[in-house]
């Protein structure tokens, strides 16, 4: 199929195979890519420029496509996009504009595409109006794409990884791994108009996230979020979501392959995503190790597990201190050995009915172990509701209350950075006073009351008596209408479920942020408390295995 799509001329010593996209010889054998930075790409919290948070994206286009990459501010002396200057450009990238394109600019861009240019449209969620002029990126791009057959919906949703349907028969998605979305907008493809097709949909809303099509002699690619290309190198004070180089996502390959398709070339190579640990294969011969073999940590990434790629320090400690191997799961649950410890970190995607049946058998009958850690309610990807559904489905009595615990006295520099206290008398936690829990919630039982230890449940850690819980706006339910004050609120517990065990953490202390001593998110983690958190995390997995 690819041979039909790409007829090419091989240029000696070039990194890419190139077709003149406009039916005429190019003025230069060097591909020229221009990033628009003339329309508020650095306003507010954004920094979508090639000397900011998109710098590594620009570097990849230079390396893998042998392209000359420039900002529009250096190419358009007039300060706006003109048809004359676009005449020598092969690809125009429009990342989340925050000021409107003028009528002349819109006409120039549309003519550029009609005559064979490629355009890379990067939108963002509804309300991403960073200069408060009433126009967000979706509305601005819709003025440009009018009558093209696509419209940005200006809604808001998050899913990481995006778990809907990916069209595998397109060069952009060839061998493409997971892609994430953090406060994205959907794309509406108008039926019967244009040549646009969906490349990826989300699972939660079943709406389009990525689309591609042609117009005249040119090509268009559209995506509903700016975060996938964020490398975290933006300006000071920018609250970014660095995921471009994450091993959990394949955003660098997406950027290179989309740009190559838009310019009608075949890259000689694409960025490779290097997993830090081997893949877990349910059908592999080693899936059923002998009963006395070393336990394994199965790190799940198949259920929208945001922050799983930020657990390097924890995984390092597991391998170095405990000697346990770590495997990465990217498939639905079908097989685990009872000595395995399954880590479900921030699962945002629902388990299938078959997975629920398997997990029940794994816990109740096989004596397996599961550790669930949740993200905070301020996160773009909320997991509380899904985790509570999983806990209910496997017969657990534990639930996570939709609240946020703060403590103005026993904290680590910020009220939401709790210094939680471990329960005394547990051999696995000997010598561990506490740990750091960021933006934790209260653990409760199925009736909505504060979780208390019983014959099945052991509370591992609580906030101090100075802490208070406040129902989170928009998440208050019958379980969390009122705040709780003056009690030691439980934040970590282990419960026996059938023959198995499940640990529930109402925050995620496994991330690298709780291990780093440099200042992170405005707070400085003390070396002693950092060590305590690392030992706490290891104690939890050891207790799961030995209990």
Image (cartoon, rainbow, N blue to C red):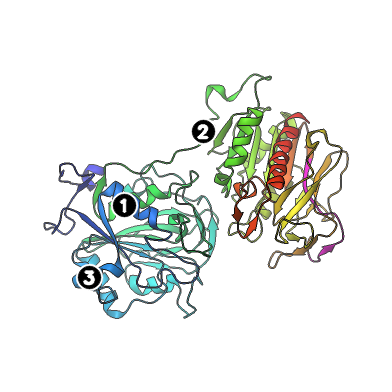
Horizontal arrangement in the rendering, residue 351 relative to residue 396 (left or right): left
- Label 1 to label 2: alpha-carbon separation: 29 Å
Q: Nearer the viewer, mark 1 or mark 3?
A: 1
- Closer to us: mark 1 or mark 2? 1
Q: Which residue is mark 3?
A: 111
Residue 236 at least partly seen = yes
Q: Which residue is mark 2?
A: 279
Q: Is residue 530 magenta?
A: no
Inspect the magenta stretch and tell me whether residue 483 lies in it: yes
Q: Which percent across, then down, holds residue 482?
A: 81, 66
Q: Which residues are magenta?
A: 481-494
Which residue is label 1 attached to? Answer: 61
Q: Say whether residue 207 is left or right of residue 307.
A: left
The secondary structure type at the circle numbered 2 is: loop
Q: Is residue 410 above or below residue 326?
A: below
Q: Are marks 2 and 3 in contact (CB under 8 Å)?
A: no
Instruction: Please state, as top left, top right, bottom left or bottom right, where the C terminus lies in the image.
Output: top right
Q: Residue at x 57, y 50 (%)?
A: 306
SS class, disc 1: helix
In the rendered structure, the answer to whether residue 247 lies left or right of residue 513 reads: left
- Give the label, 2 or 3, closer to the camera: 2
Locate residue 37, reporting x and y percent: 35, 68
């Amino acid at each position: 199929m690819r041979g039909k799509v790409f007829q090419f001329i091989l240029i000696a010593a070039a990194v890419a195979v190139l077709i003149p996209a406009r039916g005429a010889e190019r003025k230069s054998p060097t591909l020229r890519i221009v990033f628009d930075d003339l329309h508020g790409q650095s306003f507010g919290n954004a920094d979508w420029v090639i000397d900011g948070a998109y710098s590594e994206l620009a570097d990849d286009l230079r390396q893998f496509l042998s392209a000359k990459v420039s900002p529009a501010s250096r190419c358009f002396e007039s300060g706006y996009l003109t048809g004359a200057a676009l005449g020598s450009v092969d690809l125009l990238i429009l990342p989340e504009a925050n000021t409107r394109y003028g009528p002349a600019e819109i006409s120039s861009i549309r003519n550029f595409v009609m005559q064979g240019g490629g355009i890379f449209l990067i939108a963002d969620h509804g309300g991403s109006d960073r200069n408060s002029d009433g126009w967000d990126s979706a509305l601005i791009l819709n003025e440009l794409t009018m009558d093209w057959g696509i419209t940005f919906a200006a809604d808001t949703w998050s899913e990481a990884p995006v778990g809907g349907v990916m069209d595998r028969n397109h060069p952009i998605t060839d061998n493409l791994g997971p892609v994430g979305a953090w406060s994205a907008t959907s794309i509406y493809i108008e039926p019967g108009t244009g040549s646009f097709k969906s490349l990826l949909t989300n699972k939660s809303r079943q709406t389009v996230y990525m689309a591609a099509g042609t117009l005249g002699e040119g090509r268009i690619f559209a995506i509903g979020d700016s975060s996938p290309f964020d490398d975290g190198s933006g300006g000071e004070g920018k609250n970014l979501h660095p995921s471009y180089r994450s091993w959990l996502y394949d955003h660098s390959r997406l950027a290179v392959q989309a740009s190559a398709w838009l310019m009608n070339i075949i890259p000689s190579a694409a960025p490779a995503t290097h997993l830090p640990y081997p893949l877990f294969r349910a059908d592999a011969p080693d899936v059923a190790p002998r009963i006395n073999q070393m336990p394994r940590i199965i790190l799940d990434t198949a259920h929208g597990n945001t922050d799983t790629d930020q657990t390097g320090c924890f995984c390092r400690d597991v391998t170095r201190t405990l000697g346990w191997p770590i495997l990465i799961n990217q498939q639905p649950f079908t097989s685990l050995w009872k000595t395995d410890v399954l880590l479900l970190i921030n699962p945002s995607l629902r388990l299938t009915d078959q997975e629920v049946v398997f997990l029940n058998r794994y816990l109740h009958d096989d004596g397996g172990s599961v550790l669930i850690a949740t993200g905070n309610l301020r996160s773009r990807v909320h997991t509380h509701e899904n985790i509570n559904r999983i806990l209910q489905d496997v017969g657990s009595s534990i639930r996570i209350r939709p609240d946020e615990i703060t403590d103005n006295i026993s904290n680590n520099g910020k009220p939401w950075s709790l210094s939680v206290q471990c329960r005394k008398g547990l051999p696995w936690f000997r010598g561990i006073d506490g740990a750091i829990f960021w933006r934790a919630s209260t653990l409760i039982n199925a009736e909505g009351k504060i979780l208390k230890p019983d014959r099945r449940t052991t509370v591992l850690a609580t906030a101090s008596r100075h802490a208070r819980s406040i129902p989170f706006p928009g998440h208050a339910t019958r379980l969390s209408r009122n705040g709780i004050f003056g009690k030691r609120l439980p934040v970590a517990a282990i419960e026996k479920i059938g023959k198995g065990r499940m640990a529930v953490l109402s925050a995620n202390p496994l991330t690298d942020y709780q291990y780093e001593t440099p200042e992170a998110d405005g707070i400085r983690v003390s070396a002693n408390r950092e060590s305590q958190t690392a030992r706490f995390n290891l104690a939890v997995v050891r207790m799961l295995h030995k209990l």
